[in-house]
Structures are given as structure tokens and as C-alpha cells.
Image (cartoon, grey):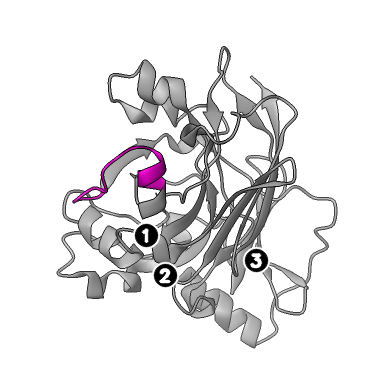
């Protein structure tokens, strides 16, 4: 099942996308796709309503696509989680997950403009598999328990301003990660039944049509289940929370590519999860 949120910022309408391309209006079932919806069995209600053909169709042509989940309570991010990316960054592969936070206010839609911070010269792209939590997870016994707490998967662009992150932050990564518009999500929230394994997904990114990243979640140092288990040992994951699971090699930080500038077009794709596209603007 694929879920979307359609409409202007702050007034998105919940929608389901069917395999035949039709969109169904979920407004009769829920006001939004958020933690309350997920915690209250919302996915099961949608499945039942689709099976009974109870939902009206909706024409979404020309309408803005929002983030597939409303503003989360938290965006937890994992750094240096792909072996090749750690190597290109000159870092030793970590023994434990490297964790930082992004402010939830920077979550935007998959086609919204990304704004360069004022004075920025080192803004970078990062295609990532994002995990949306569906049920509360704290002190999980083992990674074997973790994937049962996943509501779905989506694409994240973990936009990063490297000077703020690394040169002027004193090690406080979140300073370079939480700028306005710095976390496009979407277009869809794809439920786990449509993803055979989160550890066998191709990830790709382009800037102005040129390939930047082309990798697979097989290169993750810590897989999705391990990450959820590890995070649950020091924080409680709530329904609607987002986990950015790390980016593969091919970012500007490597020195192989120029940093973003106004007018650039970024595109991101993950197998089974759709495609994003953003124009780079100026704050």
C-alpha cells in the first residue's frame, strides 16, 4: 500500500495510491497521516476500506505532493552508515551507530524547493532510505523484534550544509542539518508488505541530470533492524517518527563533485519507493 498527502503546506489531504494509478481520498477515515493515525490502527482501516471499495477517488493532477507523513515528533539520523561513504569521507567505519537529530520543521514535500542557507557555500545532497515508525518501540529485546514496529518506508534527502556541520559547529552535526527545507520526504509511504527486504534496495541521486550516487542498502554497516533496536536502547521511538538510515558514497563532501548552487535540480530514487525532484533556491 502506498499513502500520500496532497495539497498546500499545512492543509494536505490523506490519499492512497492504488496499483492501477487511481488515487483514493482518505479524508473520511482520518484527518491526516500522522502518529495518531498510525498508532490507532489506521493502516488496517485503510486496507479494509479499500477491500470494501468504500473510498471515493480523487483527481490529484496539478496538486502539490506533501511529505507522506505529517510533521514527525522527531527525525533521527544515522551518519557514516555505508561503508563506501565512510571511506570517501576519510572516516573509520563506526563500531556503533553515529546518531544526530534534524529539526522536524525542515521536513517538506518531495518536489518542494530546497533553500540554500544565507552565506552557504557547502550545501550537499544525501539520498537515504527513511523508516517511519508505526508502533511504540522502547528497549527492544533484539533486532528480530524491530521490523514489526515499521509503518513504512520512503525516500529522504538529508540535505546538509557542511561548513555548519563540520567547520563551525564544534562537532554539533545538527547545526548543519536542520536548516529550512533540509529534509524532503516522499512521494509515498510504502508499507512493508510491498518491500521484500529493506536491505536489498537500490539508491540513486542526480544533480542536473548527472549521476552522483548509485548504490544499494546492502552496503549499510548497520541494517534497518539493527538501527531500530539500537536506537530503542536510549530513546523511545513513537508512531510517526522518522529515521534517516544514512547515505551511500557520491556526495560533494568527497571532493569529487561541486556543492549545490542556486538553480541546480536534484533528483532521488529508491527501488519501489518512487522518485523525488527539487530545485535549489536561496533563503
Seen at 23% across and 48% down, the residue is: 94
CB under 8 Å between callouts 2 and 1? yes
Q: Residues within 10 Å of mark 3 (few under 14, many from 20)?
A: many
Q: Which residue is outermost to the bottom?
A: 52
In the rendered view, would you say 71 is above or below 82? Answer: above
> Do the residues bearing badges 2 and 3 touch, measured as CB atoms within 8 Å?
no
Residue 26's disc number = 3
- Residue 121 falls within the magenta-colored stretch: no
Q: Which residue is mark 2?
A: 199
Is 122 in front, or is 28? 122
The crowd level at tag 2 (other Cα within 10 Å; few <14, some 14-19, many 20+) is some
Where's the C terminus, which quadrant?
A: top right
Q: Earlier in the sequence, mark 2 or mark 3?
A: 3
Q: Secondary structure at mark 2?
A: loop
Q: Are marks 3 and 1 in contact (CB under 8 Å)?
A: no
The reply to whether residue 140 is visible in this rendering is yes
Q: Which residues are magenta?
A: 85-97
- Whether residue 19 sits left or right of residue 48 in the image: it is right
Camera-near label (3 vs 1) is 1
Q: Is residue 245 visible?
A: no
Q: Secondary structure at mark 1?
A: loop
Give the camera-side residue of 77 and 80.
80
- SS for callout 3: loop
In the image: residue 143, left or right of residue 159:
left
Residue 167 at x, y = what percent?
A: 37, 18
Label placed on residue 220: 1
Of labels 3 and 1, earlier in sequence is 3
Amino acid at each position: 500500500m502506498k499513502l500520500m498527502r496532497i495539497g498546500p503546506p499545512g492543509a494536505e489531504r490523506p490519499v492512497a495510491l492504488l496499483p492501477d494509478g487511481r488515487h483514493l481520498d482518505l479524508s473520511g477515515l482520518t484527518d491526516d497521516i500522522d502518529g495518531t493515525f498510525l498508532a490507532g490502527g489506521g493502516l488496517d482501516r485503510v486496507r479494509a476500506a479499500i477491500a470494501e471499495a468504500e473510498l471515493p477517488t480523487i483527481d490529484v493532477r496539478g496538486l502539490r505532493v506533501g511529505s507522506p507523513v505529517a510533521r514527525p515528533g522527531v527525525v533521527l539520523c544515522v551518519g557514516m552508515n555505508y561503508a563506501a561513504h565512510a571511506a570517501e569521507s576519510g572516516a573509520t567505519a563506526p563500531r556503533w551507530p553515529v546518531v544526530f537529530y534534524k529539526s522536524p520543521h525542515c521536513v517538506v514535500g518531495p518536489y518542494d524547493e530546497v533553500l540554500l542557507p544565507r552565506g552557504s557555500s557547502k550545501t550537499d545532497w544525501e539520498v537515504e532510505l527513511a523508516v517511519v515508525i508505526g508502533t511504540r518501540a522502547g528497549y527492544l529485546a533484539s533486532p528480530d523484534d524491530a521490523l514489526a514496529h515499521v509503518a513504512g518506508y520512503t525516500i529522504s534527502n538529508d540535505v546538509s550544509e557542511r561548513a555548519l556541520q563540520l567547520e563551525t559547529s564544534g562537532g554539533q552535526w545538527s547545526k548543519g542539518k536542520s536548516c529550512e527545507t533540509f529534509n524532503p520526504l516522499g512521494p509515498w509511504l510504502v508499507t512493508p508488505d510491498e518491500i521484500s527486504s529493506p536491505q536489498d534496495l537500490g539508491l540513486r541521486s542526480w544533480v542536473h541530470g548527472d549521476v552522483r550516487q548509485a548504490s544499494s542498502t546492502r552496503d549499510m554497516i548497520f541494517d534497518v533492524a539493527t538501527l531500530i533496536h539500537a536506537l530503542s536502547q536510549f530513546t523511545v521511538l513513537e508512531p510517526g517518527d522518522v529515521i534517516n538510515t544514512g547515505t551511500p558514497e557520491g556526495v560533494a563532501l568527497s571532493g569529487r563533485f561541486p556543492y549545490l548552487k542556486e538553480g541546480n535540480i536534484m533528483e532521488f530514487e529508491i527501488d519501489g519507493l518512487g522518485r523525488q525532484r527539487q530545485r535549489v533556491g536561496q533563503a
